Image (spheres, rainbow, N blue to C red):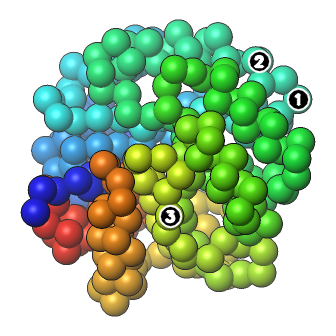
């Protein structure tokens, strides 16, 4: 079987990964050099908080071998403020130019908050976001389960916007662990199932270690979606204490992915 899945983590530069994944003495600037020896893709989340200078991505590219690629999260002005999607748009486009030119930018992630609820206006806003980041592929993640309906599915398919399937605590109002795609590229994010700290936010929200049984559950879902898409990305966002690395490594082995 041709492997069509790429497994990685949501971010890579974490101090609490020292001793859990990275050697204790690794320099922060050398973390990506080490990461690329173990994974073929990474999700860049730092861009949500601050748009970097293009040189930041130029430096990353020097460390990325052939076959390695990036998914990059759009700034919070796109998803959480939403008052003016163009606030950071020009700087963001400039920042990702080196990645785009290299062919290693596989898409952009827009992670919307629980407060972003389904409506006709909200659907239209997704189209604005897509147009703003064009021609780069856009993938959208919802936290409010009111979004999971046929009109959303049809709209995303018709406009070429990718849906992000998620695993998260089964609390009221959050999304169920369903796996489907609206483009030829499937996208899955596993956040962990820490019910106690989910609504509090902060790093403890993602303090969760998936069991082999839970990973087997997602293995079956991912294998099914792989049969319907050309590429499937799976990112582990339970980054607390390097749990994402352990789970991603185990999951990749389950799928037979390098």
Cα separation, mark 3 vs mark 1, equals 30 Å
Is label 3 or label 1 in front? 3
Vertical placement of residue 186 versus 29, above or below: below
| Residue receiving disc 1 | 83
Q: Position of residue 28 (x, y in %)?
A: 32, 36
**Mark 2: secondary structure:** loop
Residue farthest to the bottom, as pictured: 213
| Residue receiving disc 3 | 180
Cα separation, mark 2 vs mark 3, equals 32 Å
Q: Residues within 10 Å of mark 2 (few under 14, many from 20)?
A: some
* Whether residue 162 can be seen here: yes
Quarter-wise, where is residue 66 in the image? top left
Q: Position of residue 258 (x, y in %)?
A: 13, 56
* Whether residue 215 can be seen here: no
Vertical placement of residue 205 versus 183, above or below: below
Is label 2 or label 3 in front? 3
Contact, mark 1 vs mark 2 (Cβ under 8 Å)? yes
Q: Nearer the viewer, residue 57 or 233?
A: 233
Q: Which residue is pictured at 44% across the width and 12% down the height?
A: 97
User: Horizontal placement of 222 versus 72: left or right?
Assistant: left
User: Horizontal placement of 57 versus 177: left or right?
Assistant: left
């Amino acid at each position: 079987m041709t492997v069509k899945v790429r497994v990685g983590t949501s971010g890579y530069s974490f101090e609490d990964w020292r001793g859990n994944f990275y050697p204790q003495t690794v320099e922060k600037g050398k973390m990506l050099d080490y990461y690329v020896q173990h994974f073929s893709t990474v999700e860049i989340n730092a861009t949500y908080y601050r748009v970097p200078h293009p040189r930041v991505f130029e430096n990353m590219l020097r460390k990325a071998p052939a076959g390695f690629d990036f998914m990059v999260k759009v700034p919070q002005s796109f998803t959480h403020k939403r008052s003016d999607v163009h606030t950071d748009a020009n700087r963001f486009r400039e920042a990702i130019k080196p990645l785009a030119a290299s062919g290693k930018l596989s898409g952009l992630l827009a992670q919307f908050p629980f407060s972003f609820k389904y409506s006709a206006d909200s659907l239209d806003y997704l189209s604005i976001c897509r147009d703003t980041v064009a021609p780069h592929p856009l993938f959208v993640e919802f936290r409010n389960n009111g979004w999971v309906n046929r009109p959303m599915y049809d709209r995303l398919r018709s406009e070429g916007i990718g849906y992000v399937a998620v695993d998260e605590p089964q609390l009221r109002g959050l999304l169920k662990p369903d796996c489907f795609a609206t483009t030829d590229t499937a996208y899955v994010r596993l956040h962990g199932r820490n019910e106690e700290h989910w609504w509090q936010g902060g790093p403890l929200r993602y303090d969760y270690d998936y069991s082999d049984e839970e990973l087997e559950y997602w293995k079956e879902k991912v294998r099914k979606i792989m049969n319907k898409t050309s590429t499937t990305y799976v990112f582990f966002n339970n980054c607390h204490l390097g749990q994402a690395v352990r789970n991603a490594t185990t999951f990749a082995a389950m799928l037979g992915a390098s």
